[in-house]
Image (cartoon, grey):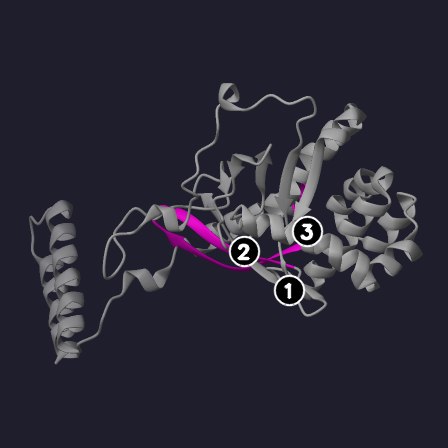
C-alpha cells in the first residue's frame, strides 16, 4: 500500500510539471508536501519507528571531549599511573566519564564546552523512595575559621590520603611543592593513610596494590623521614616505585624489612588507621589541624 501511495505521489508531481502557468515556487511546495506525506504514510503504515536519538550525531564530539579530559589528567600528572577511558555518557548537560587508574575506576565530569573538569557532583533531584540526603555524600563538618583554631607552639597538619587516589595525589603534590620551596614546612605536616588491618595484613579502598604502597610510604615516613618527600615527589609523577626509591636515596632493603615486620610496618599503619577511625575520616584527602577538620573530601567512604 505504501509503495502505491508513493507511486501516486510521483504521478502527481509529474502532473504539476506538465501544467502551464505553474510557478516554480508552487511546484516546489507541492513536491515537499507530497514527499513529506509519502514518508509519513510509509512510517505509519509499516509501523516503522523513526528514532532520532539513534542517529547520535553528538557521539563523536562527546567521545573527543572525554578523551581530552583523560589526556589532560595524564599530561599533567594528576594520577599515579596512566589513566584510561572506560566509558562516557551525556547526562544533565555534562559528559560523565569513567576512567581507570591501575585496577580502580573513578567518575569525572567534563562540561560540554571542554572548559571544566571536575571529580564529583551532588544530585539535587529526589531519589526513588525519598529525598536525597546530601550528608550521605558530603561531610557535615564545616571548615573551621582561622580565628577559631587553638594556637600552639608547633601546630601539625595531618593529611589523610590513600596512595592511589587522584585527589589525594593532588594534595600531596601541593605539599611536596611547598616543602621543596620551604623545607621547614615538613616539620609541621604529617601525611597519614586510611585503611584497616585484617590479621597482620593491611587493606585499602582500592585493593592490595594500593595497600602495599600505603605501607611502603608509611615505612619511609617513619624510618627514613628525610627521604619521604623526595620519594613522594617522584612517585606522584609516574608511580614508578623502584626508580623513585633509587632516585630519592631510600634504603629499599630497610623499607622491605619494615613492610614485612608486623611489629614495625603494620604497627605504624595501625596507628594511622586508628586515628582515621577515631576521627571519622573516610575520604581522601581529609585535612586536620590540631585534630580539627579544616578540609574534608566530598568523596566520603570511597577514598577517591
Q: Which residue has dot 1 on it?
A: 207
Does residue 83 show up magenta in the picture? yes
> Residue 85: where, in percent of width, then height?
57, 57
> Residue 237: where, in percent of width, then height?
75, 44
Q: What label sits on residue 106 in the rendered view?
A: 2
Q: Around disc 1, counting alpha carbons within 10 Å, would you say few (fewer than 14), some (14 to 19), or many (20 or more)?
A: few
Return the disc, 3 or 2, that comes first in the chain's sequence.
2
Write the start and end of the magenta stretch as one range: 75-101
Q: Nearer the viewer, mark 2 or mark 1?
A: 1
Query: Is disc 3 placed on a helix, strand or loop?
Result: helix
Residue 27 placement, left or right of 105: left
Q: Nearer the viewer, residue 216 or 206?
A: 216
Q: Around disc 3, counting alpha carbons within 10 Å, would you say few (fewer than 14), some (14 to 19), or many (20 or more)?
A: few
Return the disc, 2 or 1, that comes first in the chain's sequence.
2
Residue 29 placement, left or right of 129: left
- Residue under the image location 53 percent in, 24 percent down: 149
Residue with the most extreme top position? 147
| Separation of marks 3 and 2 at Cα, in angstroms | 28 Å
| Separation of marks 2 and 1 at Cα, in angstroms | 14 Å
- Quadrant containing the N terminus is bottom left
Using the image, determine if residue 30 lies above or below residue 171.
below
Amino acid at each position: 500500500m505504501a509503495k502505491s501511495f508513493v507511486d501516486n505521489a510521483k504521478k502527481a508531481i509529474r502532473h504539476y510539471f506538465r501544467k502551464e502557468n505553474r510557478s516554480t515556487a508552487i511546484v516546489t511546495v507541492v513536491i515537499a508536501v507530497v514527499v513529506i506525506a509519502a514518508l509519513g504514510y510509509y512510517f505509519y503504515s509499516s509501523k516503522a519507528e523513526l528514532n532520532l536519538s539513534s542517529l547520535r550525531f553528538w557521539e563523536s564530539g562527546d567521545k573527543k571531549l572525554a578523551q581530552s579530559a583523560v589526556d589532560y589528567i595524564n599530561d599533567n600528572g594528576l594520577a599515579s599511573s596512566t589513566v584510561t577511558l572506560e566509558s562516557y555518557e551525556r547526562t544533565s548537560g555534562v559528559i560523565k566519564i569513567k576512567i581507570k587508574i591501575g585496577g580502580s575506576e573513578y567518575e569525572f565530569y567534563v562540561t560540554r564546552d571542554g572548559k571544566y573538569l571536575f571529580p564529583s557532583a551532588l544530585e539535587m533531584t529526589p531519589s526513588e523512595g525519598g529525598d536525597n540526603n546530601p550528608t550521605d555524600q558530603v561531610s557535615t563538618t564545616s571548615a573551621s575559621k582561622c580565628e577559631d583554631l587553638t594556637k600552639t607552639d608547633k601546630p601539625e597538619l595531618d593529611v589523610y590520603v590513600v596512595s592511589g587516589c587522584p585527589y589525594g595525589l593532588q594534595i600531596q603534590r601541593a605539599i611536596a611543592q611547598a616543602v621543596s620551596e620551604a623545607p621547614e614546612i615538613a616539620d609541621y605536616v604529617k601525611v597519614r593513610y586510611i585503611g584497616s588491618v585484617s590479621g597482620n595484613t593491611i587493606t585499602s579502598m582500592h585493593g592490595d596494590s594500593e595497600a602495599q604502597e600505603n605501607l611502603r610510604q608509611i615505612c619511609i615516613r617513619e624510618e627514613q623521614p628525610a627521604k619521604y618527600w623526595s620519594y613522594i615527589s617522584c612517585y606522584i609523577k609516574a608511580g614508578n616505585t623502584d626508580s623513585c626509591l633509587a632516585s630519592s636515596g631510600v634504603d629499599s632493603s630497610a623499607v622491605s624489612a619494615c613492610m614485612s615486620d608486623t611489629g614495625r610496618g603494620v604497627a605504624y599503619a595501625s596507628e594511622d588507621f586508628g586515628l582515621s577511625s577515631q576521627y571519622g575520616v573516610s575520604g581522601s584527602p581529609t585535612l586536620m589541624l590540631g585534630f580539627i577538620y579544616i578540609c574534608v573530601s566530598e568523596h566520603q567512604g570511597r577514598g577517591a
